[in-house]
């Protein structure tokens, strides 16, 4: 009887360790992606973002495989470039929406259809945010996430008509 109890205790301890480790990794990813978004928003407020690229593959287009951020950047159908975002009409609202955006890491990358890529004034890349066709899931850089906020609604409302 006692060896069985010992085995159970070891298994329970191992499972608890794995759960704690996984929880710590999720928190680390959450902090990392939220920090990236907050950093982009701060740079927008400070007029340090020079260029913004908006990419899209229309949601109604069927593909054999899931679209990843890398595929979107290489095979986009539409691209809109805001060459100087420092004084543009979208800067302040976009920064506000980024500040209010809440992200949660996910385990699986969704089918990406939209991307927003941000660049410093010197054209160096600052970061990127990607969305699925509904805007509820996507990625920050290469980390799959879910989104809470109105950023996608704003993006779709302002730029969908440019891509039709």
Image: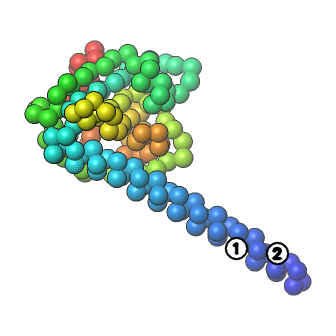
- Write down the residue under mark 1: 13
N-terminal label among 1 and 2: 2
Can you say whether 162 is above or below 114 in the image? above
In the rendered image, is residue 156 in sight?
Answer: no
Task: Residue at 39% x, 30% y: name it.
Answer: 133
- How busy is the neighbourhood of tag 2: few (under 14 within 10 Å), some, or many (20 plus)? few
In percent of width and height, residue 146 lies at 42, 46
- SS under mark 1: helix
Residue 162 in the image: state x and y as whole percent. Answer: 23, 18
Q: Quadrant of the C terminus?
A: top left
Residue displayed at 28% across by 50% down: 38
Residue at (34% x, 53% y) in the render = 35
Q: Residue at x 64, y 68 (%)?
A: 17
Residue under circle 2? 7
- The local secondary structure at tag 2 comes to helix
Is 112 on the left-hand or right-hand side of 14?
left
Quadrant hosting residue 59: top left
Say which of 49 and 31 sits in front.
49
Q: Quadrant of residue 6?
A: bottom right
Label 1 packing within 10 angstroms: few (<14), some (14-19), many (20+): few
Residue 91 drawn above or below residue 57: below
């Amino acid at each position: 009887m006692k060896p069985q109890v010992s085995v159970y205790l070891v298994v329970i301890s191992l499972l608890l360790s794995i759960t704690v480790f996984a929880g710590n990794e999720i928190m680390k990813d959450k902090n990392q992606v939220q920090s990236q978004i907050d950093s982009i928003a701060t740079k927008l407020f400070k007029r340090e973002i020079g260029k913004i690229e908006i990419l899209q593959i229309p949601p109604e287009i069927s593909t054999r495989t899931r679209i990843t951020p890398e595929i979107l950047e290489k095979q986009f159908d539409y691209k809109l470039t805001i060459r100087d975002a420092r004084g543009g009409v979208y800067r302040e609202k976009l920064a506000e929406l980024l500040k209010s955006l809440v992200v949660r890491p996910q385990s699986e990358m969704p089918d990406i259809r939209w991307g927003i890529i941000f660049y410093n004034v010197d054209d160096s890349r600052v970061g990127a945010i990607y969305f699925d066709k509904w805007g509820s899931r996507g990625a920050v850089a290469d980390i799959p996430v879910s989104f809470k906020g109105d950023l996608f609604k704003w993006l779709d409302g302002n730029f969908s008509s440019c891509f039709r």
